[in-house]
């Protein structure tokens, strides 16, 4: 799947960004440090993903970038689409909720997972009160 990147510095879209390893729709993305992360989503035949892809932004600029596919443990990250993802600190991204099931009939608003970008590990936080933001 093609990826477009917008550069605020030069106010232009970049069209030659490498393609993701997996075609994804209804994925969520955020940036942290020098990297862009694309989380979960839906593939062909409505397969839900529980993986994340990472790319280094300076390597995009140099033409040497490739997406790294990081498979998350299914026992921690239920396959989903449309979660909210947001950086928590310099090394962690929070994955909040999302949808799964036919026609978005199951919504997991209380499902919170913290992904560590350095260790590539994640942990599930069972309730809002269990994690101090």
Image (cartoon, helix red, strand yellow):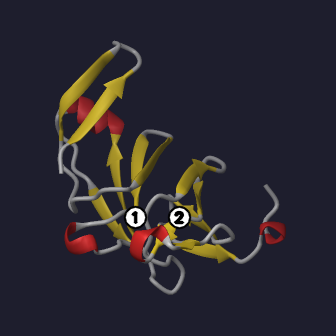
Q: Is residue 130 left or right of residue 43?
A: right
Q: Position of residue 126 (x, y in %)?
A: 72, 77
x 58%, y 53%: residue? 91
Label 1: how many residues lie within 10 Å, few (<14), some (14-19) or many (20+)?
many
Q: Front-most of 41 and 107?
A: 107
Q: Position of residue 37 (x, y in %)?
A: 41, 51
In three-dimensional space, the C-alpha distance between marks 2 and 1, rounded to whole angstroms, equals 10 Å
Considering only vertical position in the picture, is 25 above or below 78?
A: above
Is the residue under label 1 in contact with that under label 2 (CB below 8 Å)?
Answer: yes
Residue furthest toward the top? 10
Considering only vertical position in the picture, is 24 above or below 13?
A: below
Give the secondary structure at mark 2. Answer: loop
x 50%, y 40%: residue? 33
- Quarter of the image that includes the C terminus: bottom right
Q: Is residue 95 left or right of residue 54?
A: right
User: What residue does disc 1 label?
Assistant: 40
Q: Is residue 102 left or right of residue 18?
A: right
User: What residue does disc 2 label?
Assistant: 98
Q: Position of residue 105 (x, y in %)?
A: 51, 73
Q: Position of residue 121 (x, y in %)?
A: 52, 71
x 37%, y 56%: residue? 26
Residue furthest toward the bottom? 75
């Amino acid at each position: 799947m093609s990826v477009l990147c917008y550069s605020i510095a030069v106010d232009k879209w970049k069209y030659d960004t490498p393609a993701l390893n997996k075609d994804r729709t209804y994925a969520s993305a955020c940036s942290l440090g020098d990297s862009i992360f694309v989380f979960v989503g839906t593939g062909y035949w409505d397969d839900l993903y529980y993986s994340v892809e990472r790319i280094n932004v300076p390597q995009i600029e140099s033409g040497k970038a490739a997406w790294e596919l990081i498979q998350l443990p299914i026992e921690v990250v239920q396959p989903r689409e449309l979660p909210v993802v947001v950086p928590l600190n310099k090394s962690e991204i929070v994955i909040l909720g999302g949808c799964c099931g036919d026609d978005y009939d199951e919504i997991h608003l209380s499902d919170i997972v913290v992904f560590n970008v350095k260790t590539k590990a994640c942990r599930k936080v069972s309730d809002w009160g269990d994690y101090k933001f």
